[in-house]
């Protein structure tokens, strides 16, 4: 067995594709109430570059301003601008410290989904990207400028380039976003059919707890090859369910599961099974990238060592 293949599946081809610039302006407001009721105006500007590869169906963003230690959580929905355009929203936030700002970029879910996935609704959204700022302060009369690094909802599957017959190994799934106060659920299935539908395969055994960073969520699964006498292939698909808490969403909005590299039919990730241990080994990299509103396999490279 040779380690390892890295199979990236990109939800967006980001090359200055989506830029969220957030200018937070504080201003004093006169009110017929106590001084503690003074607020600061928070102006957020969402800018989408003219050559954006974000799918044209991306239609909305959930905007959130909150304090991680609790006590404040403001959320709103804004439209995602057309390429070359901007969307502006103004929110009122009390002066204070320890604030964070974040956005979830979404689009309507693609298709009606598998009949086996009863949790999906026609009003569900697909996650496109996420960005959250570091902590900042707002002072009445001052201006705070905060930048957001927006990460795409991509997925990378790291797998053995091949397995021998009756061999056990792991595949590592890395999901490219991890919004605060949210733990995306990751599942995986296998099949001997490259065109299998998710929910018709066999569940892969989870062999690790979820490992999270500020920008990624990772989980490991066990894959075991059969005791075959000739070459075979294990096909794998991944499902991610971004179960966003009400902290992010101002309405009863559902999010649909995301399937990589597909939900129904092909393609699938593949792990070759080679019973002859003397076979050449190497690294396989399969890259999928956004092509308009569809997916396109752009490279399939195989490196072998003698």
Image (cartoon, rainbow, N blue to C red):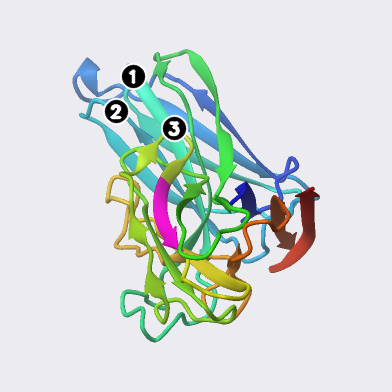
Look at the magenta stretch and give its main secondary structure.
Answer: strand
Relative image position of residue 68 (x, y in whole percent): 29, 28
Of badges 3 and 2, nearer the viewer stands: 3
Q: CA distance from mark 2 to mark 1?
A: 7 Å
Residue 221 lies in the magenta-colored region: yes
Circle 1: element type: strand
Q: Callout 1 environment at 10 Å: few (<14), some (14 to 19), or many (20+)? A: some
Quadrant of res 33: top left
Locate residue 231 relative to residue 198 in the image: left or right: right
Q: Callout 3 environment at 10 Å: few (<14), some (14 to 19), or many (20+)? A: few
Circle 2: element type: loop
| Residue annotated with mark 1 | 98
Q: Are marks 2 and 1 in contact (CB under 8 Å)?
A: yes
| Residue annotated with mark 3 | 214
Total numbered labels placed on residues in the image? 3
Mark 3 and mark 1 lie on one chain; the one further toward the N terminus is: 1
Residue 68 shows which numbered tag? 2
Circle 3: element type: loop
Q: Callout 2 environment at 10 Å: few (<14), some (14 to 19), or many (20+)? A: some
* Res. 292 in view: no
Relative image position of residue 143 (x, y in whole percent): 51, 16
Locate residue 262 relative to residue 12 in the image: left or right: left
Residue stretch in magenta: 219-224
Q: In front here: 297 or 22? A: 297
Q: In front here: 239 or 17? A: 239
Residue for point 36% across, 24% down: 99
Mark 2 and mark 1 lie on one chain; the one further toward the N terminus is: 2
């Amino acid at each position: 067995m040779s380690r390892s293949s890295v199979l990236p599946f990109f939800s967006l081809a980001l090359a200055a594709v989506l830029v969220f610039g957030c200018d937070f302006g504080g201003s004093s407001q006169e009110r017929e109430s106590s001084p503690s009721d003074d607020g600061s105006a928070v102006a957020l500007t969402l800018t989408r570059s003219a050559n954006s590869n974000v799918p044209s169906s991306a239609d909305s963003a959930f905007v959130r301003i909150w304090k991680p230690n609790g006590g404040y959580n403001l959320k709103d929905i804004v439209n995602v601008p057309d390429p070359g355009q901007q969307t502006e929203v103004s929110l009122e936030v009390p002066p204070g410290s320890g604030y964070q700002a974040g956005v979830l970029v979404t689009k309507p879910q693609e298709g009606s989904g598998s009949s086996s996935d009863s949790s999906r609704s026609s009003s569900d959204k697909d996650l496109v990207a996420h960005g959250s700022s570091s902590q900042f302060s707002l002072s009445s009369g001052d201006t705070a400028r905060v930048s957001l690094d927006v990460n795409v909802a991509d997925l990378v599957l790291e797998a053995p380039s091949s397995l021998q017959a009756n061999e056990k190994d792991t595949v590592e799934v890395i999901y490219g976003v991890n919004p605060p106060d949210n733990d995306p659920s990751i599942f995986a299935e296998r099949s001997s059919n490259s065109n299998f539908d998710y929910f018709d395969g066999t569940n892969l055994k989870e062999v690790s707890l979820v490992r999270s960073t500020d920008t990624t969520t990772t989980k490991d699964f066990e894959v075991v090859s059969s005791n075959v006498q000739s070459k075979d292939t294990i096909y794998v698909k991944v499902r991610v369910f971004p179960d966003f808490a009400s902290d992010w969403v101002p309405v009863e909005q559902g999010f649909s599961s995301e399937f990589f590299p597909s939900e129904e039919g092909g393609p699938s990730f593949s792990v070759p099974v080679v019973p002859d241990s003397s076979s050449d080994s190497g690294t396989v990299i399969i890259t999928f990238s956004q092509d308009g509103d569809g997916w396109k396999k752009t490279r399939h490279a195989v490196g072998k060592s003698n």
